[in-house]
Image (cartoon, helix red, strand yellow):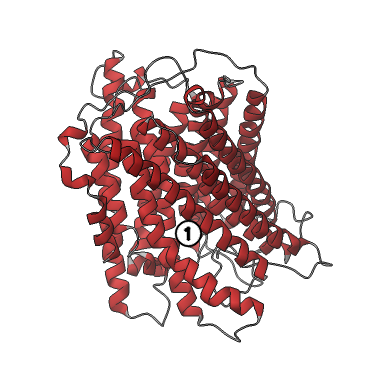
Amino acid sequence: MSEAIEGDRTFVDEFPEEARIVRSALLGSFLALFLGAVFGIIQTLHRTGVFRGIISSTDYYTSLTAHGVFLAISFTTFFLVGLFTWALVRSLDRPLIDIRITWTWYAMMAIGMTMTGVSILAGFVDSIDMSADVLFTFYAPLQAHPLFYTGLAVFIVGSWIAGADWFRTFLAWKREHPDERIPLQTFMVLTTMAMWYIASSAVAASVLIFLLPWSLGFIDQVNPTLTRTLFWFFGHPVVYFWLMPAYLLWYTVLPKLAGGRLFSDPLARVVFVLFLLLSTPVGIHHQYLDPGIAEGFKFISMTNTMFLLLPSLLTAFTVVASVEYGARQRGGTGLLGWLTDLPWRKPEFTGMMLAGLMFAAGGFSGMVNAGMNINYMIHNTIWVPGHFHLTVGTAVALTFMAATYWIWPQISNKPIYSRTIGLFQVVLWFIGMALMSNAMHAQGILGVPRRTAEPEYSGFDYPTMFGGFEELNVQIAIGGTLLFVSTVLFIANLVLTMGNPRVSGLAESLPPALSGPDDAPQVLDRLRLWVGIALA
């Protein structure tokens, strides 16, 4: 089947109902992005001591929970379901089986996250006997209100139904095209969701069997190590659940923006199969200091984590090769001279390229997290937030924002209000994250703790390294402020875009890969085989 919709009709022209779902999911995602950014700047200014008049020290942890849940769970997952709906329908060139089911899972996710959000925000109001100051890592012994866990359960079930909706649509397409290869974007959607079913089953068990009954008073106590292990069985694969939509955009949209085509469809399929197989058995590397887990399991987890370098390196090669091909098609020459012939004035292109660059830096710091011996030095320090602000905070978030500048016209027939503002916004995000993350990593080496409202101790001085502790605090505050301004610019640009009149001529097709699906072994499309191995 065609990998691109031919003609000048946009996605919303071809599939108006599906476009409504995509727009609704993305808007829900950006609402969570704004809320998370608000709480992010509040806690940044409080922790660094720049301004502590907004919240109290106890409310800092409510703010930290809101920041983590709204950004790491709500923003990422709502964008994912919107993007995956667009990608599956576009690549199969057919509507979803039953749009009523689609609206059902969207409603469940929205209701579930609203319940969870209310339980968190109620922690700011002393007169309401409800709180959920359990941070993003919501395992025992911290306990939240039952509404928090109920909302998460509803949200996760909604995401499961979304996956079933996409699998049903794919199976209907397969019956009509039994001899055709799975379109690449559809392949990426299905392998990602297969991984999500496996990973999220653990956190669902933790919530439904242990945490929710515990918070309701049905059981007196739970095993903290067990709930922690179940969480991290989900908690590290969820990183790839965020990243795989970004990979989808890097593989299928970024080469087109560069003026070329994807270098290798088979390599892209191999990468997603590897993520399906390797993402789940690595979570214990978050528990190197947990005494209840045998050293042998920790070593196995470390080894599996190192194997995850392979799909990341394959991605770096394939995406850069695709971009270079596009630059040379545009007239680029020389060993590195082709870099100047790329469309750097396009916010969607520049944003995704800068996100990929940050992801490379995040990969280096991630290797420190993954190594058992080196991890002991930075465990539970602010180095760790510095790392995941490079990965989910930039590789994912900046890619999602940049891609919106390309996708939104396709799903609304409305041109972006200002691409100049968009370009400034993505560059500002990159600068802000470079400042903040660099200082977080440096403070982590000094031993500055994470998850702490005021990391200052009487009679204790952090040694000077890469600038003193206070200087690094200023760098974090400046970086965090730039990130907040970038978020506001993005939201404002999108709101103004929604006020634009509808126009025609915005259609964009995605060209086929240089090495297409027919060059890939048929075994790559045997999803049952790979899911079976992943389960084993």
Three-letter amino acid code of the residue under disc 1:
Val
Q: Which residue is at 64% across, 76% downward?
A: 215
Residue 404 rendering spot, x and y as whole percentages: 52, 31
Image height of 233 relative to 113, above or below: below
Along the line of sight, the residue nearer the viewer: 209 or 358: 209
Work out which residue is located at the far right of the displayed protein and give it: 127
Q: Nearer the viewer, residue 390 or 84?
A: 84
Q: Quadrant location of the N terminus?
A: top left
- Quarter placement of the C terminus: bottom left
Residue 252 seen by the camera: yes
Residue 355 at x, y percent in the picture: 44, 38
Which residue is drawn at the image coordinates 64% and 50% (left, top)?
40
In x, y percent, where is residue 486?
61, 35
Label 1, secondary structure: give it.
Answer: helix
Q: Which residue is mark 1?
A: 384
**Residue situated in front as seen by the camera: 116 or 423:** 116
